Amino acid sequence: MSWTVKKSNGIYLPRIGWRLDARKATPNAFISHAHFDHFGNHPSILCSNSTAELLKARLPGNREWLTHPFNEPFHIESGVRGELFPAGHIPGSSMLRLESEEGSLLYTGDFKLHSSPAAESCIVPKADTLVMETTYGIPKYTFPPRSEVAADIIQFCHDTIADNFIPVLFGYSLGKAQAILSILQDSELQIMLHPQVLKMTQVCQKIGFEYPSFEPFDFRRATGHVIIAPPLTSKSSWLNSVEKKRTATISGWAMDPSISYRSGTDRAFAISDHSDFLELLEFVDLVGPKQVITVHGFATEFAQTLRDRGIDAWELASERQLNLNIVISRDSQPSPPSPKGPSQVHVNRSRGEFTHFATTYEAIAKASSHERKIELASNYLDSLDPSDIPAACLFLSGRAFPRSSRKKLAIDSKLNRQAILTATDATELDYKRSRATHVDSRSALLALVTRPDGSDRRLQDIRSLFTHLEQAPNPIYQHSLLSEQYKSMGPKETLALTLIATGSGTGDIVEDVVEEALARRTRNSVDSVKRANLRCSNLEKVANAAIDQLLDFVPLKHFYPMQLEAESIGRMDLEFLSTLPSPLWTETLFDGIRCQIHKIGEQTELFDESGTSLKHKFPEIVESSIHIPQDFVAEGLLVAWEKEQPLSISKLLERIRKPAEDLFIGEDVDTLLWLNDLLWFNGDTLIDQPLSNRRRELNTFTVNPKLRISPVTRLDSTEDLPTLLEDAKRRGHKGIIIKDETRSFDPLSPKSPRTLFY
C-alpha cells in the first residue's frame, strides 16, 4: 500500500479519496484556512472550528461541517486517523496529519512557523511524509526581525499624520489586516477599518481574538486616523475618497525592491503570514520527514535546496504526480524514486540549451527569406533530443503556451523591464541614460545586460518558469521569478525570454516556419503537420505526434475555434462559371455572422469567424443546441430572424455591441443559426472527408426552431444560377454560396473552396 499524491483540484490523495484545499466543488474536502484561493463551494467541509466560522462569513449556502478542535484525533476514513494542528498562518488555519498503523503524512496548507499575535501559534508534529507550501522558498526571502519592521510601520504612520496626510496600510482583509491591527496595539494611533476588513475582524473577535480599538471607515473623519484596507488599485473609488494619503503595502514581497512601483504605493514593509526561507528549513527539521513534497511558490528551488542537504524532496507540479511508494511500515524505508520520476528531469541533459535556442531564435528572426528561416529552424530541431522538440517548437513560435490552452502570461513590458533592471542592479535612471544613446527601448534595456550568454538554463526549465509565472498570485511574485532568471542570462537569452514572456515575439517567426521545420525533422509531410496543428492549435502536441508518426490521430480540439475556410467573391460571367464543377452545390447566403458551434453533452460554445466567443451574447442559441442529442462541432450562419423572414445583420450587431448585463433576450431581436457544415461528430473528426459526406451526417440532426440545417440546391447547369441568385435576394437574403461537394474541409488551401455571389 502506498500514498499517492496528485495535484488535481488542490492536493488529491487517492488513497482516501480526499482533496485538500480544492477550489472546485468536491465531495470530500479538507480546507486548511479561509482564504479565497483555498476553498470552494463543497457540499461538506472538514476544517478547524474557527475556520468554519470564518468560512460561513465568506461562503453562502448550507453544507455539512466536519469540524474538529486542534490536537484531538479523529477517524477520516477506515484505517486512517486524522488530526488538526494550528498552522500559525491566519486565525483558524490548520495542518492535517494523517496516520495509519504504519505511517504518516502531514499537509501544511499555508503556515507561519514563528508565532504571530494574529493567529494561533504553530504546533509542528512529526511525520514520515511532508507536503508543504514553499511560497518564500529561496534565500532572498529571509525577513528582517518582525519587531523592527513593526516599529518602522508605526513610525511611518506617525510621520504621515504629522505631515497632515492619512496613512493607508494595505493587507488582505483576513489575516494580514488583523496582523496589522496587532502591530498597532500600543502605538496610541486611532484606527479605521475598510468595510471588508471590518467584517472579517469582527468574526475574528467572535472566535476569541482581541485587537486594539478601531472604528468603521468614515471619509469625513478620516484625518488623523490610520486606515487598514485590502489591496486596492489607484482606480478604486473608495481609495480615491481618501484625500491627502500616503499608502503602504504590508507583504513578504516587500523584499523585492520594485514592490512599491508594482503595487503603486509609497512604501512597503516586509511582514508576512507565511514562513520565510529560514523558517521553512527549520520546519522541515522539526517534522523530520523521510520525504518532502513542495507545492506553491518557489517549490522547485526549495526542493533542490533540500536535496542538496540530503533530503528526498520533489516539487509536485500540475503535470506530474508523485507516487511516493511509501510501504506503510514504521520499520521499512521508502522506496527510491522511479527512474522516470521527477528525480531524473535534469539528468544527462546538455547544458546551455536555452543559450542555443536564443541564438537560433535571433538568427531565424533576422533571416530574410522564408526558405532560409525553415533551414535554420530545421537544423536547430535536428540538434535536439526528441524530448526537447515540443518545447522548442512552441517557443520558436514566440509563445509560452499553446494557442488552444488559452493560457496567457500577464507580463507587461514595465514589469519585465523592472525584472531586468533588478537582475542587472540597474535603476530607472540608468535605463533612461541608456535610452538616450540607443535607437529603441529594447536595445537600451539589453545594453544594461553585461553578463555574457551561456547560462545553464534548459528548455524544460523555461517551460517550468512559464507555468509558475502563469499561476503566480500577483505581479510581485512574477517580478521575483523573472529577475532570478535574468540574473544568470546574457543579452540574447534575455531578449528571447523577454519576447516569449511578454508575447511580443509571436510575429518574429510565423508558425508556417515551425511546421515545415518540424516536418523535415520528423520526416512527415508538411500537409500532415499543418492539418494536425489546424485541428488542435497546439504545437507541443503536434510535435509529439510527429515524432511518434501519429499525426493522423491528433484529434480536433473541442471548445476552441478552428480556422475557417476562406471565401472568394465571384462575378456572374460565363467564363468564370465554366470553371465550376458539375453538378453545382448551392446554398443561401444569409445576411448574418459566420459562426462555429461546439457542443458536447450540455456544454456549448459559440464563436464568430475571428474566434471571439458569442456564448453570452446569444444564450438562446446555446440553450437550444443542448436539445440536439448528438455531440458535434459545426459551422453555420447566425442571422436575425422574425416571422420566418430574415432581418438585417445590423440587428445582430446591435446586440453584440451591448454589454452582456444589458441584454434582455425577450425584448431583443429573434435569432436563428443555420448549420451548413459538420467538422466533428460523436467522436469522429470529419474534416478530411468530402463535403457531401459531412452534410450527410449533418442531415441526421434533430433540429429545432433556433438551429436548422441550411438547405442545398444542386444545379446541373450554370444557366440557372442568375435566376437562383435573384430569387435569394428577393427573399431578403444576401446572395448564394457555391461549394465543391467533393472537397475536404481545407482552410489551408490557397484556392478557396467557397465562392460567394451577391
Image (tube, helix red, strand yellow):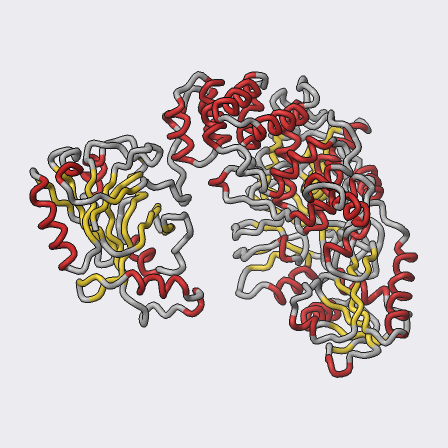
Along the line of sight, the residue nearer the viewer: 421 or 433? 433
Viewer-proximal residue among 513 and 245:
513
Q: Nearer the viewer, residue 266 or 581?
A: 581
Location of the N terminus by quadrant is top right
Tell which of 127 and 201 is nearer to you.
201
Q: Is residue 349 above or below residue 305?
A: above
Outermost residue toward the bottom? 220
The image quadrant that residue 10 belongs to is top right
Which residue is located at x 62 percent, y 47 percent? 20
User: Residue at image x 73%, y 67%?
Assistant: 229
**Rendered residue at 58%/24% (across/down):** 388
Residue 5, image x, y percentages: 61, 36
163, above or below 631, in the image: below
Across and down, in percent, residue 750 comes to 33, 33
Which of the 4 quarters of the picture holds residue 102?
top right
123 relative position to 186: left or right: left
Asked if residue 42 lies left or right of residue 316, the reply is: left
Is residue 260 found left or right of 570 in the rendered image? right
At which x and y percent is residue 588? 18, 50
Count of numbered circles on the image: 0
Image vertical order of residue 268 relative to residue 536, above or below: below
| Residue 234 visible in the snapshot | yes
Residue 256 shows in the view: no
Q: Where residue 403 sits in the image (x, y, percent)?
A: 49, 40
